[in-house]
Amino acid sequence: MARAAVLGRLIGRLAWRTATVREVVAESEHAVTLVLDVTDWPGHRAGQHVDVRLTADDGYQAERSYSISSAPEADAIAITVERIEDGEVSPYFTDVIRPGDQFELRGPVGGHFTWSVSDGGPILLVGGGSGFAPLMAMLRHRAAQDSDVEVHALVSARTDADALYRDELAALGPAEGLHVAWTFTRGGPPGWTGYTRRVDAAMIAEVGPAPARAPRCFVCGPTPFVEWVTGLLVDAGHDPQHIHAERFGPTGGRA
Amino acid sequence: MPPISRGFHRRREPEPDQSRIPPGQYPTWDFPVLSAGPTPHTPTDGWTLRVDGAIDEVRQWTWDELLALPSETFTVDIHCVTKWTKLDTTWTGVSLDTLLGDVETEAEYVVAWCDGDYTTNVPLEDLLGGRAWIVYDYGGEPLEPEHGGPARLLVPHLYFWKSAKWVRALTLTLDDQPGFWESAGYHDYGDPWREQRYWGD
């Protein structure tokens, strides 16, 4: 246990680095992916996040945290940002920023919500809305490693048009060991025969893997979604110690 | 000089009392939830709070015994390492001065243990002097499980991950033993006013 404290002293402060926007990719009506060139980027593990810091021309600064959606193997890092209407940073990223623009970034941060193919499987990934970003990093990493580790992924989105990475996910599978399911909670596209309901116990059971196989489970999304899904997983018999959660956004509860 | 982000401007009204917002933080009026796993739902029947480790004698309180101790209702600002600050949050609970007041110890640190196996470490002196509580009410209502109920540690002068949810035991230790986040890259002490978010900050 003492190792962590010592490492902390040896590693030194995580430096702020300059990130330059290489590309802005529209993911949906509400979300973009920023592909970033970062000076001396030290590399990351799939699932980690970064802190960003923006500076206005009057010196005003704002910091936020975003999950990395790109694979460690990629030659640039990517973050996926969903627009929060009354937000300060996300509307700038979704509506204003363009290639060549710069801001600061430091990281990677986080060691709990991470996975690499060497950790093995099976694993279950459940993402709600833009919560699929760190899970996408895991799937991209798996693909980059040409791995056949068993992964079950469940993507929950309001509609087909809201689903992030839809085409890329469809292109990843079906592949050996990879099972991807979508649920469109406000109805699927024409001809859709898959799920069109909120994630529930039956869906969790169908998507698998079974609790008896002791999968590590990664759940990311808005707080009410994560509370709900992690509760379903515990009720289904998954070991709480195997369930990793990342929550964001408002609680929907008392302010 | 940091690079200027073209076209980026302040969109939020400045907090009336900006001196209460630590560096890198922004005020929120919601109450976000950050936890590493599922929310435990622990019944208060059979619930106990234990103080052990390098002390003269183990202490333990049942739920009813905790509620019977002198409580305080107080209003503080809380600061999460994920950047949000929430001003004027009102809690009710028992001061750690009350719980630890008669403990004899050489310990200088404390590890908080929680349902869900979360741990966090805090210097003992940071839990004393009216700066830390075991709280069970938030805003005049029982603390909801997703916010740490039935009871959580509250150490508002440190980043909020130190205010361990679902706390069940405090182990006093002679040496500093990094907890869950502290072992995973987060700062050992976590002072928001010195922006001690990560190792090396």
Image (spheres, rainbow, N blue to C red):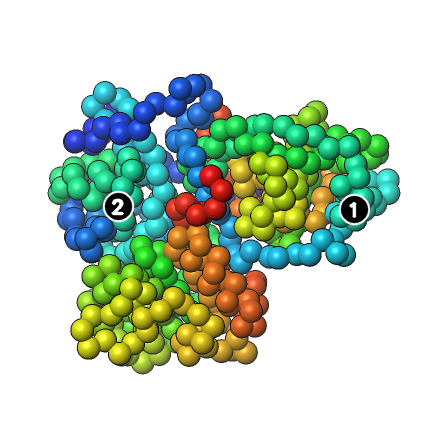
- Identity of the residue drawn at 39% across and 46% down: A249
Mark 2 closeness class: few <14, some 14–19, many ≥20 residues within 10 Å: many
- Identity of the residue drawn at 76% across and 50% down: B48
* A22 to the left or right of B57: left
Classify A57 as above or below B5: above
Classify A70 as above or below B74: below
Q: Secondary structure at mark 2?
A: loop
Quarter of the image where one finds residue B162: top right
Marks 1 and 2, Cα distance to the nearest angstrom? 46 Å
Identify the chain of the residue marked 2, using the numbered disc in the image: A
- Residue type, mark 2 in image: Arg
In this rendering, do the residues under marks 1 and 2 share a single chain?
A: no
Mark 1 closeness class: few <14, some 14–19, many ≥20 residues within 10 Å: few
The answer to whether residue B165 of the structure is visible from this angle is no
- Identity of the residue drawn at 41% across and 45% down: A250
- Residue type, mark 1 in image: Asp
Q: Secondary structure at mark 1?
A: helix
- Depth check: A75 or B27 in front? B27
Provide the residue designation for mark 2. Answer: A83
* B171 to the left or right of A103: right
Q: Position of residue B125 (x, y in %)?
A: 69, 29
Quarter of the image where one finds residue A144: bottom left
Q: Position of residue A70 (x, y in %)?
A: 28, 56
* B109 to the left or right of B101: left
- Identity of the residue drawn at 26% across and 27% down: B10
Provide the residue designation for mark 1. Answer: B64
Q: Position of residue A81 (x, y in %)?
A: 27, 48
